[in-house]
Image (cartoon, rainbow, N blue to C red):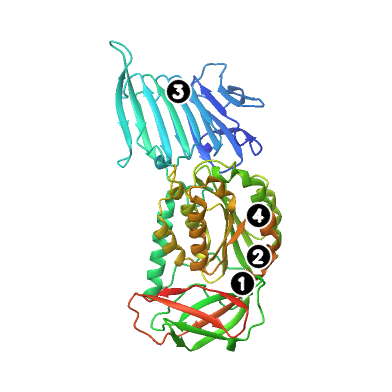
Amino acid sequence: MLTRCAVLLGIGVAGLPAQPVTIENRFGGVFVEIVKGRKLLVGQSGKTREADRGDVFVEQGPQAMRIAVRPKDGEAVDLRVMVPFGIPLAIATKDGDIEISGMMQKLSVRTESGALTIAAPWEITRLDLDARRKPPRVAMPPDAKFMQSRIWIGPKESIWRLRDRLDVNAAVYGDIEVKLRNSPELILKTYLPPDDWPLKSHLRSREIAARLIALRKQREQGRPAPAGPPSPAADGPPQPASEALFVSNVRMVSLTAAVSDRQGRPVTDLDPGEFTVEEDGAPQSITVATKDSAPFNMVILLDLSGSTSIDRVHMRNVTVKLIELAGKDDRVALYALAGGMFHVLAALTADHRSLIERVERLPRAAGGSPLWDSIVLAYGEELIDRAGERNALIIISDGIDNRISNQEAPSALNAERLINAAREMDARIYPIFLRSGERFARGWSEKARNRMDKLAEVTGGRIFPALSIADVEPVLPRLAEELRSVYSIAYYPDNQNFDGGWRKVKLQVARKDVVIRARPGYFAR
């Protein structure tokens, strides 16, 4: 956006994520774009002359920043600003137009007679707009949910009002307040954040769930799924997927299994001949049984909703321990649910030092708990494109989605759709279940644990209940070892009539006192 004018200055805001910024221009318009960067960039363009640094004044105090246009010659000057997301904004003009685009957390707009254009993700943005008179031209997205009304404030004086129609319990990110007097034009547009935007609405879980079903259908029809990013082990042999896979015309079922002793320690010395498999109670002939060890992808999802605020320190400590246990070739990603939004704090990386530094700057624990949606988003962010690799999704949470507590911001996906989506995931889910939710009583924690147990079961993972960090820390090294060392099992089912029904698979090993964790079955489609 600043290519249209001279860039006057760039102001670092890395340490000021919540410092409000006020932008005033009584000599022209203000054009703002919300961006991912860590610098606030300010540019200026004049109507009849080149940009002059002296036209713009910036005052930065300990609590706020103010940017004002004051040209000495009174020349009309437009101000163009790129603002990092998450910074509260207040914008004011006299007769200059205002345009703003992006995911804005808190925005206040004032103009006397300038036109106004706002592009925002309206499904998660509240709007509170009052105007002395309705602008002659008003344009809104066709699917917009806004309510117009006229409020009389005197015998001959009224206010035109525009409000959002979002549900009172909806999870919202943006809050926009607008005051207009005699604006000639109001244009509202829908802003769609790019796929790599680090902040996402939990409602996008529906798209990921639909994509999981589409990928399954591609496999059923023998068509290859879209290729994802290259794996670090791309030069080696292909890694088997951890779910039931079918190759066109060759109906082989491929599973992976983690084996541990009764104390939870991984068992890594089994021979292929020690495994047996049954499908719907009928013994099957195993074609492949091998032990694999390869780098893993570990995604950590932190539940920083309001109910987990008392666990914040414990969650940070567990996260650091997990990162420290990863090997030099293991990649780790860090995501969070906070303020009802899904945050991508760090994508998959082997730079563990930078991840630990990022853990020290976690979002504030607040907001509702659309946890089930966030679990699906955590898988859909990167792991969905890495089928066949060592994938693990670790959830540190009290498990209380707002569908359980009947509070604001419940997940779009219900429990059944969550479990069905998990069945399609090529990743083991390991919930670190914080029992602090028991303080709410009402059975919330028990229901949450049952859901987390089921997620672990259908993906071949396991749950780790915890009252404190002391409960979890001793088992973390075993978890890391388990992620690296699993067994791959493949067989051709005797029943080749794939009618779409569920088939129960029972994997056993000829050794006492061991526990096998694998997917409990598959849909024979």
Circle on res. 233: 1
Q: Secondary structure at mark 2?
A: loop
Instruction: Tell me where residue 129 appears, x and y as whole percent.
Output: 39, 27
Closer to the chain start, of discs 3 and 4, is 3
Q: Secondary structure at mark 4?
A: helix
Which residue matches tag 4? 319
Q: Are marks 3 and 2 in contact (CB under 8 Å)?
A: no
Report the mark closest to the observer, 4 or 2. Answer: 4
Count the labels in the image. 4
Q: Are marks 3 and 4 in contact (CB under 8 Å)?
A: no
Closer to the chain start, of discs 4 and 1, is 1
- Which residue is pictured at 67% across the width and 58% down the height? 471
- Amino acid on which disc 2 is placed: Asp
Mark 3, Cα crowd under 10 Å, few <14 / some 14-19 / many 20+, is: some
Q: CA distance from mark 4 to mark 1?
A: 25 Å
Closer to the chain start, of discs 1 and 3, is 3
Circle on res. 477: none
Q: Secondary structure at mark 1?
A: loop
Q: Are marks 4 and 1 in contact (CB under 8 Å)?
A: no
Q: CA distance from mark 4 to mark 2?
A: 15 Å
Which residue matches tag 2? 330
Which residue matches tag 3? 110
Report the mark closest to the observer, 3 or 4. Answer: 4
Q: CA distance from mark 1 to mark 3?
A: 55 Å
- Which residue is pictured at 66% across the width and 66% down the height? 480
- Amino acid on which disc 1 is placed: Ala
